[in-house]
Amino acid sequence: IADKASIWVGMGMTEKQGGSDLRRVTTTAIEQADGSYAITGHKWFFSAPTSDAHLVLARTDAGPTCFWLPRYTPDGARNAVQVLRLKDKLGNRSNASSEVEFHGAWAQRLGDEGRGIPTLIEMAGYTRLNCVIGSAALLRAGLVQALHNARERHAFGRVLAEQPLMQTVLADLALESEAAMRLMLRLAQGFENNEPAWQRLMTPAAKLWVCKRAIECSGEAMELLGGNGYVEDGVLARLYREAPVNSIWEGSGNVMALDVLRAVAREPDVALALLDEFAASDDVPVQAEALALRRLLTGDPAVLEAQARRVAQGLVLCAQAVLMRQQSSMATADAFIATRFASDGRLIGTHAVPQAAQILNAARPPDQLCSAQRLQLSSSRWTRRPLT
């Protein structure tokens, strides 16, 4: 590894009994005379098994501990890691996931004994940000495909994109995509500036919300193409299969919601200051939501856990509304706030979207990027071919 200009590093935490409660890890680490450790056990999901090294969670007498486990030992031999099989996954197939066993594998300890979970969770903050980035990209990719199809296809004597109901659905997707993009960039800025409210509170909330919205919206984009969206000739089938993984790995929805509550409990002043910032909005629906969240978070703790997803949703919608008001056009911000804080429907396209045509015009990609070509998924690679 020392001779390489760069390296790949994966993670190994999840075991057969599950990955949400890492305190139950069964893989063991025994210290050797030279200060290294021998790792024995298994990992049920072992990301990128061809990586140069992995950060592995294993148990010592002090509890779960983080270890640096390279692919090769210092003497150049292959480390004692046996790949049992590659996972046959629904999507994310180009990124290998494996099941492995460790048979006295050589490793070095990272951090203090018994503090492995906090060590790895610090890195998990960045991977959760990656999940938000990936899901925001999926939202945009699906929207672009749907917009292009609606501009080119005719039904009932009119271009689809000119029909009022289709405009409402497309505009709703465009609002979701832009809001995810604004939130994702603000999260990245929070990491860059080491802002606790955005790193520890908004990151799990955003991962829960944006990743789940990508699942719903990729399905909606597929439906807008009809049968052509459901076949492997186009990109949407792959987007649809890819979307769920970001909700699952690095912590499922419930884990993220509970992480939000833990962040509030650890740093209540940070959470309340963020809510005060949201409540200072000039938009009445945002003010009302921020005040409702404050009452919920400072109310009866006995009922708070069951409302954890509600808290995460409210935080994200307030943040997106504030960001849209600051950075988006007035029409887009008005439409987002009018639809996301309404109660007259939960499906994409059930809200009347003000100025839908203007929003769609702003959302459309440059014609040269999508009018002459489309992506086709073959069995082994992506290829481009002209539209017929």
Image (tube, rainbow, N blue to C red):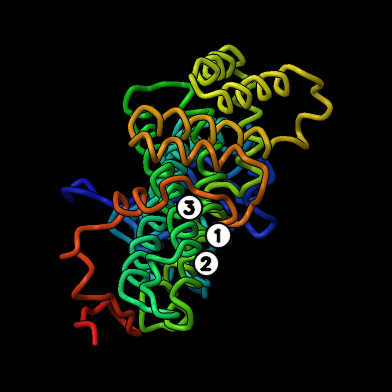
Of residues 354 and 178, the one drawn nearer to the viewer in this rendering: 354
User: What residue is pinned by disc 2?
Assistant: 219
Of residues 182 and 148, the one drawn nearer to the viewer in this rendering: 148
Amino acid of disc 2: Gly
User: What residue is pinned by disc 1?
Assistant: 216
The relative height of residue 20 versus residue 218 in the rendered view (above or below) is above
Of all residues, the one furthest to the bottom in this rendering is 388
Q: Are marks 1 and 3 in contact (CB under 8 Å)?
A: no
User: What residue is pinned by disc 3?
Assistant: 172
Q: Secondary structure at mark 1?
A: helix
Along the polypeptide, which appears first: circle 3 or circle 2?
A: 3
Where's residue 273, x and y in %? 54, 13
Of residues 66 and 354, the one drawn nearer to the viewer in this rendering: 354
Amino acid of disc 3: Asp
* Mark 3 surroundings: few (<14), some (14-19) or many (≥20) residues within 10 A: many
Along the polypeptide, which appears first: circle 1 or circle 3?
A: 3
- The Cα–Cα distance between marks 1 and 2, rounded to whole angstroms, is 5 Å
Q: So how many labels did they put on this image?
A: 3
Q: Are marks 1 and 2 in contact (CB under 8 Å)?
A: yes
Amino acid of disc 1: Glu
